[in-house]
Image (tube, rainbow, N blue to C red):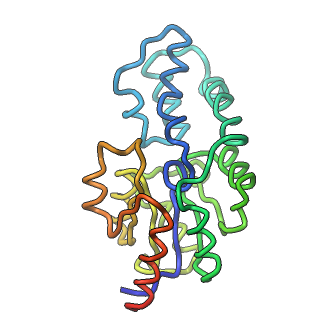
Amino acid sequence: MKTIKGVIFDVDGTLLDSMGKWSTLTSDYLKERGIVPDADLDETIFKMTVGGAIQYVKERYHLEESEEEIQKACLSRIVAFYRDEVQLKKGARELLCYLKENDIRVMTASSGERVLQEPAFERLGVRDEIEELLFCTELHTDKSTPEIYRIAAEKMHLSTDEIVVFEDALHGVESAKSAGFLVCGVEDEASAQDRKKIMALSDWYVQDLKDAIKMICFQKKKS
């Protein structure tokens, strides 16, 4: 196994403690319109991009509003949260600082939106620790395939076995592993039902991101 030279982070639930806010966003929107959402709606749209989720909700519940109007209404509820409230996951700041100090390249690969995440990273003072933010929506893909991770690897000019992908969600872990990346699963309550599967598939699993520092240091000694 080669020395780790690059890291790709998922964002929501991995670097940012934001999944709790997302978990009922769409259901709450529908309820305020007098629509009873399916009991498994939040689980169904969990792995979708924001755009994909909105398209699904519009078609599933026959909403008259355009997708743009639905997205604007939903995003307006969460923009302020990212701008003013969202916090880093436990140990994220320490891990990001370690990676920067050790010249390990860092990118993010997210199903979320730049308008939300970039202001959050700026406010939290870690934007400079991240070389580039990549988004499924901008790259016209989603995490049902490993395409976004491959694009990040190409930008880093690194092979998959030189990169660790940090993911909190099962579908992200599965996609990254299918492309040959090393994977570190990250504890998040939103993925609790998949914890055993994530742990089984991942090369490493952490509840506190700073624990990954030991993992990377150990890997450097082995290489």
104 with respect to 44 (left or right): right
The front one of 192 and 6 is 192
Instruction: Give residue 207's quadrant in the image.
Output: bottom left
Q: Give the answer, above or below, for where 23 lies relative to 30.
A: below
Instruction: Give residue 121's quadrant in the image.
Output: bottom right
The front one of 99 and 164 is 99
100 with respect to 18 (left or right): right
Q: How many labels does the image show?
A: 0
* Residue for point 30% across, 42% down: 193
Q: Where is residue 217 in the image (x, y as percent from the top left)?
A: 46, 83
* Residue for point 37% across, 34% down: 43
Q: Quadrant of the N terminus?
A: bottom left
Q: Give the answer, above or below, for where 122 lies relative to 76.
A: below
Q: Where is residue 57 in the image (x, y as percent from the top left)?
A: 47, 25
The front one of 37 and 13 is 13
Q: Position of residue 56 (x, y in %)?
A: 46, 29
